[in-house]
Amino acid sequence: MSGHSKFANIKHKKEKNDAAKGKIFTIIGRELAVAVKEGGPDPANNSRLRDVIAKAKANNMPNDTIDRGIKKAAGDANSVNYEYVSYEGYGPSGIAIIVDALTDNKNRTAANVRNAFTKGGGNVGTQGCVSYMFDKKGQIIVAKEEYEGDADELMMTALDSGAEDFSEEEDSFEIITDSDTFSEVRQALEEANIPMASAEVTMIPQNYVELASEEDIKKLQKTLDLLDEDDDVQQVYHNWDE
């Protein structure tokens, strides 16, 4: 894991998101709607909703926008018909890609995802074809520029609350949790007023793959850009060593 600047990657994503806030807000809005439908509108009794709210705040979604989204979902609970779907496949040089989507039309989403893979010279595979190369973990990033406390103190807070691992990068601290204990760890850090640049359950590659060919890099970027532009796509994971 060392050598990968997590915070730099997150800043890069945020800068892209800042240019298209509508996209990230659409993604989070759908996640809010599903979380409310599944567990109710009260974050105190709905850990999934608490996690989505934390994600919304990390992406600078205004509080009133979050509140409106929750109220709208609570009022229209029966009309929320988004389904989670996941696709797995390969990009150039066997790069492993997982696409998580939240959609109200699975046929449309499947066609768009397949098109993105094809245009980048890759192909969609069967369920499980690449997910075994990833570990599903909670990942919390604390940026050094936002955190003024002591590193050892942060580590103890994280580990005492149930984190599995703590590592220091050049510009950030990375906290890894089991996916089942992520909510508790994130909440403990929030209660300790520790600023989080990112906090989410993610798929972490067991190994990273470098691309030597400029052509392959362009093809993979084409796939990733097309997926990023699709409102149904919530998250894309890959093992490309950028």
Image (spheres, helix red, strand yellow):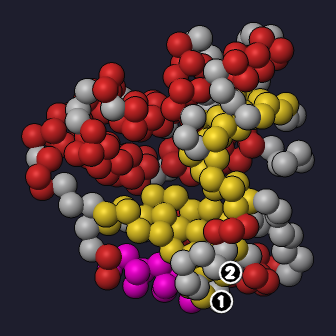
Identity of the residue drawn at 38% across and 62% down? 84
Residue beneath the point at 23% across and 32% down: 41
Give the residue at mark 1. 121
Position above or below: 126 against 88: below
Reading the image, the residue beneath label 2 is 91
* SS category of the residue bearing label 1: loop
Q: Position of residue 14 (x, y in %)?
A: 58, 44
23 vs 199, nearest the viewer: 199
Q: Quadrant of residue 52?
A: top left
How crowded pointer 1 is (Cα within 10 Å; few <14, some 14-19, many 20+) is rated as some
What's the amino acid at mark 1?
Gly
| Quarter occupied by the C terminus | bottom right
Looking at the picture, does residue 141 appear above or below residue 224?
above
**Image coords of residue 153 (percent x, y):** 77, 11
Instruction: From the viewer's side, name the closer residue of 48 and 122.
Output: 48
Label 1, label 2: how far apart the Cα atoms are: 7 Å
Residue 61 can be seen in this image: no
Asked if the stretch drawn in magenta spans residue 91, the answer is no
Left or right? Give the position of 63 relative to 221: left
The percent position of residue 38, horizontal first and vertical second, equals: 27, 45
Amino acid type shown at disc 2 = Gly
Q: Is residue 28 above or below residue 224?
A: above
Q: Which residues are magenta?
A: 108-118
Q: Label for residue 157?
A: none
> Which residue is rendered at x = 66% and y = 37% of the image?
177
